[in-house]
Image: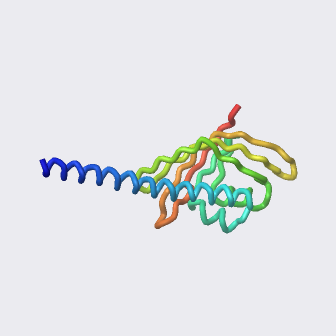
Amino acid sequence: MRIKLMSLLVIVNLITMTALAQSKEETAVAAAVESLKQAMISGERAALEKIADEKLSYGHSSGKIEDKAAFVEAIASGKSDFVSIDLTEQTISVSGDVAIVRHKLSAATNDGGNPGTVKLAILTIWKKSGKEWKLIARQAVKVV
C-alpha cells in the first residue's frame, strides 16, 4: 500500500512540475507580447529591434509582408502609428523553444497623420533565443 501511495505522489509531483514549467514559459511569452505592444505604441526603434528576430516575417491584414528592417522602420518612423492597442482573447501555446500566440487586437491609429481604428485577429510565432523570446512571424486578418 505504501509503495502505491508513494508512486502516486511521485506521478502527481511530476505532473505538477511539468505544468508549472510550461506556465513559467507561457508567462515569459506573455511578457514578450506585452513588450512588443509597448514598443509598437512608443515607436522606440531599439525596443522594436530587440523584440524582433532577424528573420521576421510580418504579415499585414492587407497581404503586405515586411521583413524586420521594414517592420521596424514603419513603426519607428511613424508611417504606421499605434496610439493605443488593446489585446483580448489571448492564447499561448509553448512547444520547446517555439510559442504560438493568438489574440484579438483593437487599436487606435494615426498612420501618416490620419486617425483611425483597426480590429484584427493576430497569429504570432515566437522563438526562444537564449533567455529571450523573439517574434519570428506575425499574420493579421481583419475582424468584421
Work out whether residue 80 can be spotted: no
Residue drawn at x 38%, y 51% is 19
Quarter of the image for residue 143 reads top right
List x then y, in percent, for residue 92.
51, 47
The quarter in which the C terminus is drawn is top right
Question: What residue is drawn where x is 66% and y is 60%?
Answer: 69
Q: Quick one: which residue is furthest to the top in this view?
A: 144
Apparent side of residue 132 relative to residue 21 in the rendered image (left or right): right
Q: Residue furthest front?
A: 1
Residue depicted at x 63% and y 60%: 35
Residue 100: where, in percent of width, then height? 51, 47
Q: Position of residue 108 (x, y in %)?
A: 78, 47
Residue 106, can we see it? yes
Given residues 141 and 105, the one toward you in this image is 105
Residue at horizontal 22%, vertical 48%? 8
x and y, in percent, of residue 41 in the image:
73, 57
The part of the image, by quadrant, that contains residue 42 is bottom right
Color encoding of the figure: rainbow
Question: Considering only vertical position in the picture, is 120 above or below 73?
Answer: above
Left or right placement of residue 33 versus residue 28 in this view: right
Tally of numbered discs? 0
Towards the viewer: 117 or 74: 117
The part of the image, by quadrant, that contains residue 50 is: bottom right
Where 47 sits versus 115, above or below? below
Between residues 79 and 82, which one lies in front from this camera angle? 82
